[in-house]
């Protein structure tokens, strides 16, 4: 039985069943429930807000088209997030000719001052991640935030595992360098 009252608080299972029956209000409620969380994912992978919005829209379209494949044996949010991440990766691959990932023979770079991250707000760190080049940012997000292995990243981005590792090491190095610069400015301003 289809509920007359649909809201973002409606359980996912009920919204999904109604979405499968082409109920537009249920589709909107499902979108409203997860759009802001998924937009945060899109922004991490994109160069700007309009590109993130495109990824979000395309990801939701894919999710709705494949909703019949969701088996209710895990969280819907996790399933949707995977679609959004894969959509973001596809967008990266389409533009890969503009921002190539270069093979590198560099080994892992030594990173010091691990506690430095605790002194910055999460928002500041996200801004610094956004400033990374698309290649570094994509590998960093996939490995650190999404939990992909270097093997999975290599396969998804059509690069070698060594390139994935060196891109991650370089991204970490650049982030730590920028964080240390920010902390230096902060310490200087506060008289430490």
Image: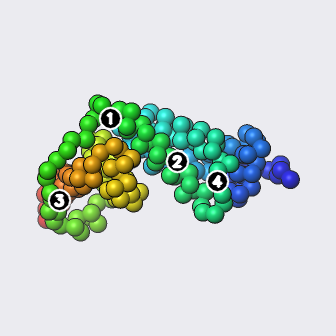
Q: Is residue 5 above or below residue 94?
A: below
Picture coordinates of residue 138 (x, y %)?
34, 46
> Dot 3 corresponds to which residue?
108
Considering the image in quadrants, where does the C terminus appear? Answer: bottom left
How far separated are the C-alphas under marks 3 and 4?
A: 39 Å
- Which secondary structure lies at badge 3? loop
For mark 3, does the 10 Å Cα neighbourhood hold few (<14), some (14 to 19), or many (20 or more) residues?
A: some
Q: Extreme right residue here?
A: 1
Q: Residue at x 23, y 69 (%)?
A: 115
The label on residue 70 is 4
Which sits earlier in the primary sequence, circle 2 or circle 3? 2
Which sits earlier in the primary sequence, circle 2 or circle 4? 4
18 relative position to 123: left or right: right
The label on residue 96 is 1
For mark 4, does the 10 Å Cα neighbourhood hold few (<14), some (14 to 19), or many (20 or more) residues?
A: some
How far separated are the C-alphas under marks 3 and 1?
A: 24 Å
Which sits earlier in the primary sequence, circle 3 or circle 1? 1
Which sits earlier in the primary sequence, circle 3 or circle 4? 4
54 relative position to 17: left or right: left
Residue 137 seen: no
Picture coordinates of residue 160 (x, y %)?
27, 49
> Dot 2 corresponds to which residue?
83
Contact between marks 2 and 1 (CB within 8 A): the answer is: no
Picture coordinates of residue 32 (x, y %)?
62, 46
Which sits earlier in the primary sequence, circle 2 or circle 1? 2
**Closer to the camera in the image, 101 or 4:** 101
Q: Residue at x 28, y 60 (%)?
A: 120
Contact between marks 3 and 1 (CB within 8 A): the answer is: no
- Which secondary structure lies at badge 2? helix
For mark 1, does the 10 Å Cα neighbourhood hold few (<14), some (14 to 19), or many (20 or more) residues?
A: some
How far separated are the C-alphas under marks 2 and 1?
A: 20 Å
How far separated are the C-alphas under marks 2 and 4?
A: 11 Å
């Amino acid at each position: 039985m289809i509920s007359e009252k649909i809201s973002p608080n409606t359980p996912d299972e009920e919204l999904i069943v109604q979405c499968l029956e082409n109920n537009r209000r249920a589709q909107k409620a499902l979108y409203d429930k997860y759009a802001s969380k998924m937009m945060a994912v899109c922004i991490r992978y994109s160069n700007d807000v309009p590109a993130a919005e495109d990824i979000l829209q395309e990801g939701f379209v894919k999710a709705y088209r494949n909703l019949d494949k969701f088996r209710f044996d895990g969280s819907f949010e996790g399933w949707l997030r995977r679609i959004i991440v894969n959509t973001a990766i596809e967008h990266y691959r389409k533009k890969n000719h503009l921002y190539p990932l270069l093979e590198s023979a560099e080994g892992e770079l030594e990173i010091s001052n691990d506690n430095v991250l605790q002194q910055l707000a999460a928002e500041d760190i996200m801004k610094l991640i956004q400033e990374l080049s698309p290649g570094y940012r994509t590998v960093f997000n996939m490995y650190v935030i999404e939990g992909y292995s270097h093997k999975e990243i290599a396969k998804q981005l059509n690069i070698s595992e060594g390139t994935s590792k060196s891109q991650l090491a370089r991204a970490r190095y650049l982030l730590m360098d920028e964080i240390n610069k920010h902390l230096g400015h902060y310490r200087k301003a506060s008289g430490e």
